[in-house]
Image (spheres, helix red, strand yellow):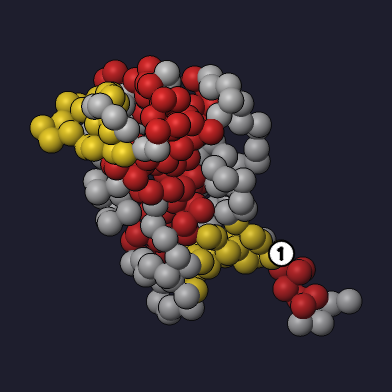
Amino acid sequence: PQGGLGSSGAAAYAGGAAERQPLPAARLQEMPEALYGSPAAEPELPAFPELSLIGQHHGTYLIAQNDQGLYLIDQHAAHERVNYEYYYEKFGRPADASQELLIPITLEFTPSESAKLQERLHWFEQVGVVLEHFGGNTFRVVAHPYWFPQGEEASIIEEMAEWVLSERAIDLAKLREASSTMVSCKASIKANQKLTPEEANTLIRRLAACKQPYTCPHGRPIVVSFSAYDLEKLFKRVM
């Protein structure tokens, strides 16, 4: 682990709605002051523990501690969860964010995909994307939400199209959830990315403010903990 990061003090706490904000992958400590909600179906969970940052392992896992034990946090999964809850709320208000593009994005599909997609274009508008048939197997995106991660717009809409084409029965709730998951993954930091102490603390603090801070949108665990007893048992200090 990197040294000297523990002096930041308590990094995580169960914050209020004002802490629930998007985390740009480039600079985690600089975030717009936007509030967001979270999926209504999330179960009631125990409050996230207060943690002090120790360091970062292999640019992938944050290491933290408190009086109860040691905690390992998957930084990509944590960032995905924070972003997912932000984008889930954003996709609930697509009309407020859709912006017309000066240069449309052009997408190509197979003949069978093209025929099916033309029947389902209205679903894209439900999440703020205006996709038009442009002739043959070509479609163009003439508008999308302004908060799509920069440089990832085309790949996000392609993934949305794959999802829309693959679903036998589409409903708005599933579309909103799937879209939020796609965007949050694209917008999140990856493994093997070094974080400054400020960035790591910010990520832990924002995770603590989430409605569901323990699993990412794909269902993977975010936090693995070892109690003080677990650690003592590993070193045979106790039986």
Q: Nearer the viewer, residue 217 or 116?
A: 116
In which quarter of the view is residue 69 placed? bottom right
Please tell me whether residue 167 is drawn above or below residue 82 in the rendered image. Answer: above
| Residue 23 left/right relative to 15 | left
Task: Tell me the residue at 65%/41% (across/down).
Answer: 46
Q: Secondary structure at mark 1?
A: strand
Q: Which residue is identified by label 1?
A: 227
In which quarter of the view is residue 148 placed? top left
Q: How many marks?
A: 1
Examine the rendering and report whether any part of residue 110 can be seen.
yes
Q: Nearer the viewer, residue 90 or 7?
A: 90
In which quarter of the view is residue 226 placed? bottom right
Three-letter amino acid code at disc 1? Ser
User: Residue reaching furthest right?
Assistant: 239
Q: Residue 102: give x, y in percent of width and height.
A: 10, 32
| Residue 167 left/right relative to 108 | right
Q: Residue 87: give x, y in percent of width and height.
A: 40, 34
Q: Residue 216: give x, y in percent of width and height.
A: 55, 47
Examine the rendering and report whether any part of residue 11 can be seen.
no
Quadrant including the C terminus: bottom right
| Residue 46 left/right relative to 24 | right
Task: Tell me the residue at 38%/67% (across/down).
Answer: 193
Q: Residue 83: give x, y in percent of width and height.
A: 41, 42
Please tell me whether residue 74 is drawn above or below residue 90 in the rendered image. Answer: below
Mark 1, Cα crowd under 10 Å, few <14 / some 14-19 / many 20+, is some
Task: Tell me the residue at 13%/35% (across/down).
Answer: 103
User: Residue reaching furthest left?
Assistant: 102
